[in-house]
Image (cartoon, helix red, strand yellow):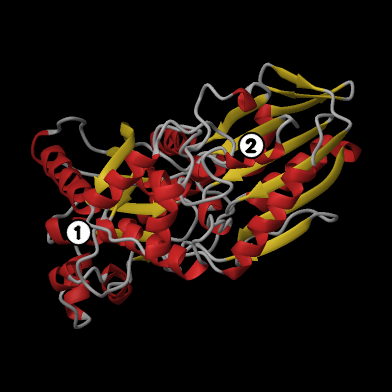
Amino acid sequence: MREDLQEIFAAGLSAADPQLAVRRELELEDGAILAGEKRFEPRRVFVLAAGKAAGAMAKAAKELLGEKVSGGLVVTKDGHDPGPEGFETVFASHPEPDERGVQAARTVQELAESLGEEDLLLALISGGASALLADPAAPIELADLKQLTSDLLKSGADIGEINTVRKHVSVLKGGGLVRLAHPAPTTALLLSDVVGDDPSSIASGLTAPDPTTLENTRRVLERYGIEPPDSVVDHLQSAEETPAPDDTIFENVVNRICGGGRHATSAAAKKAGELGYTPLLLTTTLTGDALGAASMYAAIVREVLASGNPARPPCAIVSGGEATVTVRGSGTGGPNQEFALALAVELDGVEGWTAFSADTDGNDGSTDAAGGIVDGETAQRITDAGMDPEGALADNDSYAALEAGGALLLTGPTGTNVNDLRVALISRG
């Protein structure tokens, strides 16, 4: 079943290929650029690609548009693919921002402000762009932005809540990029890494109107007991609201979802069926704590093995979405590794199943692992290696535990980023 899971994961990644995603939504016809129902005939086209899939998306756009492109900037994570020849590529830190991301954001701001109404800004946005474009609004310093980001990531807040805060402490996010580029039109192709594929949440809504407010931001901080640095407090007290959906700057803006988690989960379910497993796609919008998601999966596996419900084995239980971790300990890991370890603990000694949970970008949390791949013997292997799997869970140390049990899923950067993917294969009843 492990080999089958590898094929299923590969199928999910292939369906989320960034270059295919761009080609689905962008066309060149008689010198005009078509995106969705909009047709643009600009004098010049400038490409901004930001995120973990930025390099691949930029290459596809340049191949499609050729000489129509007057310039390009790619901002991506260390170790990921650069942009095409002739484009400037900037590498920066993720998930916590660094000084290179600050400089990248300044370069983007200068580019946007240089555009005229006869130009077109083609924004190619993928997951990770929020952190990679470190654009703290005055008087916020980078160190304070890093502290705020770290506190949010550890709090258990979901990505939508995190982005609500990011939008209101930033220059480019929450529609700020469009405001700077106006009156130049903007076409944005979005490779979604957020549940629900809301353009205002993908990469903190660089090109989308912002339905959230400063009051929403304060509530998120209060809900999770986050005390922001003084510079953030000062900014939030004096900041203006981000551009709302009725703002006229969005009249000549197109936001198109070119790929997302639904593509990956559907392809994974299809491949499972081809391999002889009855696929059960639970949801593409699973959110919440990874421990709770693992408990749900464990209950389904037990029910299938006991009664053949909700599907008779051999079957595949598939889901997508974005789980979170509430950090209580001092260990290392991420939501997918925590899910995998918790599932292994709950189903310790149970035969007939194997499962993986993985971040489709190849990096779960701040680690070099995509996630974990576990079965009914994993917890015992961890114990045999001298670690307590339950203690590792309590300390949020899933990486070390899975490594000890030979259960880390290591892919390296995949070149895409469309949410988490979880699959459990059950072979017998």
Q: Amino acid at mark 2?
A: Arg
Q: Which residue is nearer to you in this view: 69 or 322?
A: 69
Res 61 quadrant in image: top right
Badge 1 element: helix
Work out how far the residue at label 1 is from the one at label 2, CA to CA, in angstroms.
45 Å
The residue that appears at 82% across and 37% down in the rendered structure is 45
For label 2, the SS is helix
Q: Is residue 365 visible?
A: no
Q: Is residue 298 shown above or below 23? A: below
Choose mark 1 or mark 2, whichever is in front: 2
Q: Residue 325 location in percent, x, y?
A: 27, 57
Specify the amino acid type for callout 1.
Ala
Residue depicted at 62% across the width and 26% down the height: 250
Picture coordinates of residue 224 (x, y %)?
23, 53
Residue 382 seen by the camera: yes
Q: Position of residue 186 (x, y in %)?
A: 69, 32
Q: Is residue 309 above or below residue 79?
A: above
In-image side of 136 versus 187 (left or right) = left
Q: Position of residue 269 (x, y in %)?
A: 40, 35
Question: Which residue was labeled with disc 1?
Answer: 342
Which mark sits nearer the N-terminus, 1 or 2? 2
Residue behind mark 2: 179
Q: Nearer the viewer, residue 176 or 404?
A: 176
Toward the left, the furthest residue is 306
Q: Residues within 10 Å of mark 1 (few under 14, many from 20)?
A: many
Q: Which residue does the image show at 56% across and 43% down from the upper left?
A: 14
Query: Which image quadrant: the C terminus?
Result: top left
